[in-house]
Amino acid sequence: MAGLEVDILTLFPGLCEGYLAGSILAKAREAGLVDVAVHDVREHAAGKHRVADDAPYGGGAGMVMKPEPLTEAIEAARARRPGAWVVLTSPRGQVLTQALAKELAGHGRLILVCGRYEGVDERVRSVVDREVSLGDFVLTGGELAALCVVDAAGRLVPGVLGNADSAGAESFADGALEYPHYTRPPEYRGMKVPEVLLSGDHRRIERWRRRESLRVTRERRPDLFERLRLDEKDLRLIEAGDDEL
Ligand code: SAH
């Protein structure tokens, strides 16, 4: 059984397949670590034309996704994956964070529902467990949000990232942003790699990284910085110069 099992329900399967067929997610799927299936909601739409949307009651612009095809697509997915959480992508949802990605990955079975047009008939929510938003902006469809969930949750499945440590040290793992990275060459256009990183002294490097992580977080995301639980060592470290590390 894969560490993460996902069904994506969409009117545009092709939009999702392309992203899922490349890079780390494709390898994770091949290795059986992540199982993602994309389903066309239109298969559950009735009639010769398989219409999945209709005009809104009460008037107004745009079309609304009909309740029957989506509800039935969700029920069919649920029958295939018992216990899966049904997650509707929506600007009204809980904003996707690393903590939420972790929670969704931890559950392990997800049915991700992509809206289109003006959104989905309110009655679809009767078969939905969670609503997830990418942020305070409006997309044309839920596919990008569904892919973000698969990507963010999928990379947390043990074995998906090459290096077991990569998911532990990065941004948001402990509430702070990550420290800056450098690779070769040691000097580029006059910009030098910090001496500490070339020192081979792993304890100093660790302290440098912690200090940079705290400084970047304080500067860029004071809201996150305020919520960090810093100890005496951190408070001293954040003021330290490179030669004091
Ligand atoms: N009329 C709606 C927006 C519909 S956008 C409103 O004003 O709230 C169409 C679809 O795109 C939605 O059903 C949802 O699935 C997706 N979508 C749009 N913005 C999103 C966001 N910020 N996060 C997640 N999904 C979003």
Image (cartoon, helix red, strand yellow):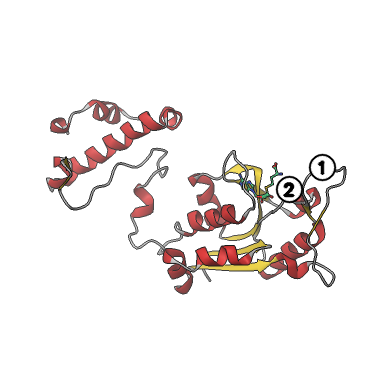
The relative height of residue 220 versus residue 117 in the rendered view (above or below) is above
State how far apart marks 2 and 1 are (Cα): 10 Å
The relative height of residue 216 versus residue 201 in the rendered view (above or below) is above
User: Which disc, if any, is residue 83?
Assistant: none
Whether residue 3 is visible, yes or no, is no
The relative height of residue 168 versus residue 136 in the rendered view (above or below) is below
Q: Which residue is found at the position 40% from the left and 41% from the top?
A: 174
Verify CB contact (< 8 Å) between mark 2 and mark 1: yes
Residue 97 x/y as whole percent:
51, 44
Q: The disc labelled 2 sits on which kind of residue? A: Glu
Question: Left or right: 21 with respect to 10?
Answer: left
Question: Left or right: 9 with respect to 168?
Answer: right
Residue 58 x/y as whole percent:
87, 42
Residue 145 x/y as whole percent:
58, 52
Question: What residue would you read off at disc 1?
Answer: 60
Does the numbered disc 2 mark a residue whose Cβ is under 8 Å from ligand 1?
yes
Q: Which residue is found at the position 55% from the left and 67% from the top?
A: 17
Q: Residue furthest right?
A: 58
Between disc 2 and disc 1, whose residue precedes?
A: 1
Question: What residue would you read off at disc 2?
Answer: 118
Alpha-carbon neighbours of circle 1 within 10 Å: few (<14), some, or many (≥20)? few
The relative height of residue 160 versus residue 123 in the rendered view (above or below) is below
Kind of element beneath mark 2: loop
Q: The disc labelled 1 sits on which kind of residue? A: Gly
Q: Quadrant of residue 165?
A: bottom left
Q: Quadrant of residue 158?
A: bottom left
